[in-house]
Amino acid sequence: MAKRVYLFNEGSKDDKDLLGGKGANLCEMTAMGLPVPFGFVITTPTCREFFEGGNTLPRHLQTEYNVALKLVEEKMGAYFGDPQNPLLFSVRSGAPVSMPGMMNTILNLGMNDVIAAGLAKKTGNPRFAYDCYRRFIQMFADVVLGVKGHQFEQQLDQYKAAHGKTLDTDMSAEDWQAIVDIYKELVNFPQDPSVQLRQAIAAVFLSWNTPRAIVYREMHNIPENIGTAVCVQAMVFGNFGDDSGSGVAFTRNPSTGEKSFFGEFLVNAAGEDVVAGIRTPLPISEMEQKMPAVYQELFETQQRLEHHYRDMQDLEFTIQEGKFYMLQTRSGKRTGRAAVKIAVEMVREGMITEKEALLRVTPEHVESFLHPMVDPSAKRDIIARGLPASPGGATGKVVFSADEAVQVAADGTPVILVRRETTPEDIHGMRVAQGILTELGGMTSHAAVVARGMGVCAITGCDSLSIDTANGTVKTSDGTSFGRLDTITLDGSTGDVMLGDIPKTEASSSEDFQTLLSWADKYRRLKVRANAETPEDAAKARELGAEGIGLCRTEHMFFAADRIDLMRGMILSDNKEERQTYLDQLFEFQKADMKVLFEIMHDLPVTVRLLDPPLHEFLPHSEEDLLALAERLGKPADVIREAARQLQEVNPMLGFRGCRLSIVHPEITEMQVEAIISAAIEAHEAGHNPYPEIMIPLVINVREIRYITDIIQRGILKAMAEKQVSIPYKIGTMMETPRACLGAKRLAPAVEFMSFGTNDLTQMTYGFSRDDAGKFIPVYLDKKLIEHDPFVTLDQRAVGRLMKIAIKDSKSRKKGIKYGICGEHGGDPVSIQFCHEIGLDYVSCSPFRVPVARIAAAQANVRLDGDE
Ligand code: PEP
Ligand code: MG
């Protein structure tokens, strides 16, 4: 049977999995010779045994920890349950991954009537002894017996009022003794210290499964089955008198990252008083005046710990009768700005390497430089939760239509656009909105993709909302409601919807951030491109370091109000001639837009995808829209209705899309190719170096590619011959259907690049329609039927396998093909790591995601190739 109990001198910081973060660090500090009150740790596998055994402590555990307990007694020179010389314990949770405040703690364990009297006598401080006792009763009752704290607080308030006392410091020894008697009437708790210890250990294990701990694990992707360790540590007392105290400190400022010792402390107080915020703590600098010797010891200790752990530490300490004790150290939580500053400065100080610095930042840290973020320390009353579709935080007044968004935002009022779902017709409203909230749609729905592209915060698939657009009200499933022009806040990074204006941090770059990005560029192999089609998005992408455009969705270029009707007219045309008149007009837009993109991306490749409009996104949705469109197109409503009916698809996501359009209407491709190449030639003539790459979407076989490549090549030759210039270009395909991946060997000879369109590839591999997945994926995640949303994190077992097959098979047939990814997974760090491993050449993601992808690509290199 594996050892279940470790003394503090039997482990190290590397034992986090076994002893939990807190336990492992207590062992490490003990080994460093720091003044840590002695104790022992019960391991995380014991927690799993506890659950497997039906929530009972394993047989023999008590015998094992009693052996450790004896050794702690010897070391501390005090004895558990001995009234003459009592030893009290703190019993705390400590999981391998930090879950601050989520589980339970009991302090002063080992107290009872006789021991309180003994402690009063031994210390000559009865006020202290009974203060400890009443704290113990309240905590034990709360954590072990399930009697909630407010009952005790009520009694304490009543007592204070009846006796003319206001503060805890006004209470005498007799007062606390009286409170203990009152508390004992509220609960019946065991007087035997060893029974208390057994029950407390079980209660800490059980607290792994409190609702708040479960929610926290879900939010932070912490596995359910790891369990918590239990740290049993000798108590020291900061509430012993004026030469005692407690505090918490950070070795650097956790919100700015500044290198200055930062913390707070309270004289004559237990650690929990500092944390609970009942008394206002003093800044740590005042400790230097009040207790200079102890301050010196604390200061030296924090320096030692930061050097030892090579990271910013968050410390807890206590001073008892002038003697300094360390109770905890861990890597401190920090804001994104602090994380980057600390990482970069530690490299300058020679403490860590550039590669290590890169591993110290998360996507959320990076995002705080790109978007305003909901302040992590702000109180949030969540009224609904949807999918975190586009990161950042936004506050604004609720509007229910794109037109209303434009009207209300005209004078600069921030707005949140709330819709059941969005369509291309909503673009003008999406552009002016601070945030977008939709009831339907998943992570690759129209709202999600467009919002991410624009860098606008969005939450999709928020199905607990019932939106009544006509009356301008929204109800959530918990009964809360809000209406038109009410202020709400969205956290697009978590999916939380909140009432009112919740504070946000500002976004702006910094020198340190740029330094870190330059290191990322030094260590990454994967190139990073952007998915962009408007000049603004392309310029943003380039500013944020994109090395080209990996996906220009040409149909998105026709969303703007002055061209969407041309696109609709083209789609709804009933003959080739009519279609050609629309195409001629679209040609001008296409060429002008492409020229701007080539100019912005000067010297860098621009992958232009042939038209792939999910047709339903362009058809009129209501009778009202249909009548208005008929009028604008100058056609009878019946003709439009009939054309729309004919184009109506049972399953538009799997319908008449992608290269199917080029096959059925080659004139569309002819127009596009001519526009793209003419634009490239004009950009070239204006002194730029355009690199067009024409990409054929949604292919299933090589015959399609050959058929379309013929059209493309004819168009290219015609345009180049007319102008007598030659510019480099490539023709490639998107790998978006399982069949294309499985038949990659046959596609290979016909292409120069393959770009995995993992949105469609996921949709088709799972058989989950992208537009509808938002309705059930949250339920699947909730019931743990899938681990991640496959539209966010690439499913390596299915989609990833198809990609690997496609690469291996196509490489076996033709060398020199370039491989990329341009589905939404191209911006997801876990997926990027996979793309690095399977040897892709580039990832392409939304412009605002480019810095995240640059860092994730470097992290993938460092993780895989090590840190030498
Ligand atoms: C894809 O399918 O992954 C892709 C990028 O194309 P779209 O999202 O436009 O279908
Ligand atoms: Mg696609």
Image (cartoon, grey):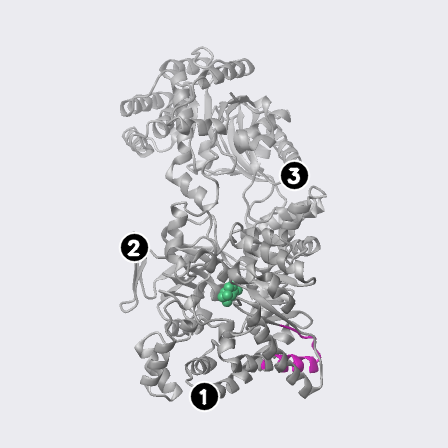
Can you identify the residue that label 1 sits on? 578
Residue 229 coordinates in the image, percent (x, y): 49, 29
Q: Which residues are magenta?
A: 675-693
User: Which comes sooner in the sequence, label 1 or label 2?
Assistant: 2
> What is the three-letter code of the residue carrying label 2?
Thr
Q: Is 788 left, or right, of 27 in this rendering?
A: left
Q: Secondary structure at mark 1?
A: helix
What residue is drawn where x is 49% and y is 73%? 660
Residue 777 counted in the magenta span: no
Any part of residue 537 in sight: no
Q: Nearer the viewer, residue 343 or 83?
A: 343
Q: Nearer the viewer, mark 1 or mark 3?
A: 1
Residue 371 coordinates in the image, percent (x, y): 52, 59
Image position of 345 with respect to 94: above or below? below
Can you identify the residue that label 2 sits on? 480
What residue is drawn where x is 56% and y is 66%? 734
Q: CA distance from mark 1 to mark 3?
A: 70 Å
What residue is drawn where x is 68% and y is 46%? 865
Q: CA distance from mark 2 to mark 3?
A: 47 Å
Q: Which mark is residue 52?
A: none
Quarter of the rendering containing residue 296: top right
User: How many numbered markers are drawn?
Assistant: 3
Q: CA distance from mark 1 to mark 2?
A: 52 Å
Can you identify the residue that label 3 sits on? 310
* Label 2: few (<14), some (14–19) or many (≥20) C-alpha neighbours in 10 Å: few
Residue 433 coordinates in the image, percent (x, y): 44, 67
Image position of 63 with respect to 573: above or below? above
